[in-house]
C-alpha cells in the first residue's frame, strides 16, 4: 500500500524553526517528485514546495521562498521541509504529496497525500 | 484571493446532479490540465479527477470532469450523503513564480 506519513509538527514561537518529515512506503520513492502543500485552519489549499526525484529541481511558493528549504533522502525514503523564521501566517496543516506529473502541463497531479501534520506558530 | 475561482458553496438533495465550476485564465486552465480533489471532513485531500476528465481507479463514475477554454467543471450525479465534502480544483500556472494554483474550494452540502 502506498503511504505517506508526516511528522514533526508542533507549537513554535514566531521567528522559530521546525523541520517536518514525510516517510514514504509502498512505492519506489526515488522515482517520484514530491510536494508540500499546506492548509491554514478553515482555509483552502496552498502549494508550498516541489522537489524532483533527484533533487535537481526545486521550486518554492513566494510566500515561503528564502525561509523554507525542501530536501529528500532517497536512501531513507524520506522528504523534509526545514522551516525557518516562522510567522503566524505559516500556521497550517502541512501535507506531503506524491507528484504524478510526467511533464510541465501535468503539474498539479498529487496522489496520494499524507494525513498531514499541524504547525502552529504562536507566542 | 485564489488564482482559480470556485463558488464557496453548493448544495443538492440525494439523487440530484450538481456541478462545481472553476474559472481561471489562459496561463493556467487555458493551457494546462485541471485536477479535482475531494476533502472529506477532517481528512486529507484525495485525488478525484486528473488530466481534466480522468478518474483514478476506485472513484465512482458518478464523478466527472470537463474543461472548456479557461474554465473547468466537476459534475456529481446521483448525489449521496457521503459526497458532502470540500472540493478543490488545481492547475499549473505558466505566468506566476508559483507553481501549482488551487481554487478556493467549494463546500458541498447534501440536503
Image (cartoon, coloured by chain):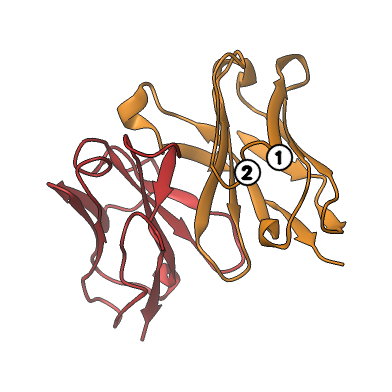
Chain colours: A orange, B red
**In the rendering, at what x and y percent does residue B48 appear?**
38, 50
Image: B39 above or below A6 = below
Residue A46 % position (x, y): 52, 52
Residue at 84% from the left image edge and 56% from the top image edge: A10
Rendering coords of residue B20 (x, y %): 26, 65
Q: Chain ID for label 1?
A: A
**Circle 2 sits in a helix, a strand or a loop, which is it?**
loop
**Picture quarter with the N terminus of chain B:** bottom left
For the point 78% across and 47% down, the residue is A85
Residue beneath label 2, please? A64
- In front of the other: B49 or B77: B49
Q: Is residue A25 above or below residue B37?
A: above
Residue at image location 34% in from the left, 30% down from the top: A106
Pointers 1 and 2 in contact (C-beta within 8 Å): yes
Q: Are marks 1 and 2 on the same chain?
A: yes
Residue placed most toward the observer, A123 or A120:
A123
For label 1, the crowd category at 10 Å Cα-Cα, with few meaning under 14, some 14 to 19 and many 20 or more, is some
Circle number at residue A67:
1
Q: Could you say which quadrant of the image residue A50 lies in?
A: top right
Q: Residue at x 60, y 24 (%)?
A: A27
List the single residue furthest toward the bottom. Answer: B111
Q: Quadrant of the C terminus of chain B?
A: bottom left
The picture places residue B33, in percent across and down from the top left corner, at 27, 38
In whole angstroms, how far apart are the C-alphas of marks 1 and 2?
A: 5 Å
User: Of helix, strand and loop, which one carries label 1?
Assistant: loop
Amino acid at each position: 500500500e502506498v503511504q505517506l506519513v508526516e511528522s514533526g509538527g508542533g507549537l513554535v514561537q514566531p521567528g522559530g524553526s521546525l523541520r517536518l518529515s514525510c516517510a514514504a512506503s509502498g512505492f519506489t520513492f526515488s522515482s517520484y517528485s514530491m510536494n508540500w502543500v499546506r492548509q491554514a485552519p478553515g482555509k483552502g489549499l496552498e502549494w508550498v514546495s516541489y522537489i524532483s526525484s533527484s533533487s535537481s529541481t526545486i521550486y518554492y511558493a513566494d510566500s515561503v521562498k528564502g525561509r523554507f528549504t525542501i530536501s529528500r533522502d532517497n536512501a531513507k525514503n524520506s522528504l523534509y521541509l526545514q522551516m525557518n523564521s516562522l510567522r503566524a501566517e505559516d500556521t497550517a496543516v502541512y501535507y506531503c504529496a506524491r507528484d504524478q506529473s510526467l511533464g510541465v502541463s501535468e503539474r498539479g497531479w498529487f496522489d496520494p497525500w499524507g494525513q498531514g501534520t499541524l504547525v502552529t506558530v504562536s507566542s | 484571493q485564489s488564482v482559480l475561482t470556485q463558488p464557496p458553496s453548493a448544495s443538492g438533495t440525494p439523487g440530484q446532479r450538481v456541478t462545481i465550476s472553476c474559472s481561471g485564465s489562459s496561463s493556467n486552465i487555458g493551457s494546462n490540465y485541471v485536477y479535482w480533489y475531494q476533502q472529506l471532513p477532517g481528512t486529507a485531500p484525495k485525488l478525484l479527477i486528473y488530466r481534466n476528465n480522468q478518474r483514478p481507479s476506485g472513484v465512482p463514475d458518478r464523478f466527472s470532469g470537463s474543461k472548456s477554454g479557461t474554465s473547468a467543471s466537476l459534475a456529481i450525479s446521483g448525489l449521496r450523503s457521503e459526497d458532502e465534502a470540500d472540493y478543490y480544483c488545481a492547475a499549473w500556472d505558466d505566468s506566476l513564480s508559483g507553481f501549482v494554483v488551487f481554487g478556493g474550494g467549494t463546500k458541498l452540502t447534501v440536503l
